[in-house]
Image (spheres, rainbow, N blue to C red):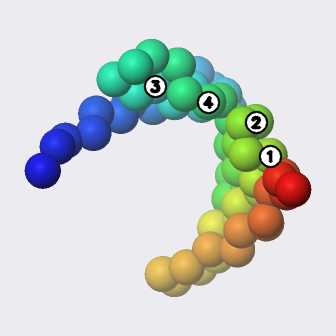
Amino acid sequence: MRFHLRKTLRLGPVRVHLTERGFSSWGLQLGRWSWNARSRRHTIDTPGPGHLRSRGRRRW
């Protein structure tokens, strides 16, 4: 089994996601709302163990 190394750099509301190959994606987080620029997916953190997630970009 192989380990996957990931790291998230938090620069204020901007999040930069890095993997062992380098830059992966970036996003924004404001309070309970977040957005990923690569997948264009919106996520809202809800109270308790759960969240709401949009479908993001659709590929044909």
- Asked whether the residues under the numbered discs 2 and 4 touch, taking CB atoms below 8 Å apart as contact, a structural biologist would say yes
The label on residue 40 is: 1
Viewer-side residue, 26 vs 24: 24
Relative to 49, residue 3 above or below: above
Above or below, comparing residue 44 to residue 5 in the picture: below
Residue 40: x and y in percent read 80, 46
* Separation of marks 1 and 3 at Cα, in angstroms: 17 Å
Q: Residue 16 location in percent, x, y? A: 57, 26
Judged from this view, the residue extending furthest toward the top is 22
Q: CA distance from mark 4 to mark 1?
A: 10 Å
**Could you say where residue 2 lies in the image, as x and y percent from the top left?**
17, 43
SS at mark 1 in the image: loop
Residue closest to the eye, 15 or 41: 41
Name the residue at the bottom extreme. Answer: 48
Which secondary structure, mark 4? strand
**Is residue 42 visible to the viewer in this orientation of the structure?**
yes
Asked which quadrant contains residue 11, the reply is top right
Q: Secondary structure at mark 2?
A: loop
Residue drawn at point x = 19 percent, y = 41 percent: 3
Extreme-front residue of the structure: 60
State the residue position of label 4.
25
Q: Label 2 belongs to which residue?
A: 37
Callout 1 touching callout 2 (CB < 8 Å): yes
Residue 32 quadrant: bottom right
- Determine crowd level at label 1: few under 14, some 14-19, many 20+ residues with C-alpha closer than 10 A: some
Earlier along the polypeptide chain: callout 4 or callout 3?
A: 3
The x, y position of residue 59, in whole percent, is 83, 53
Q: Secondary structure at mark 3?
A: strand
Q: Residues within 10 Å of mark 3 (few under 14, many from 20)?
A: some
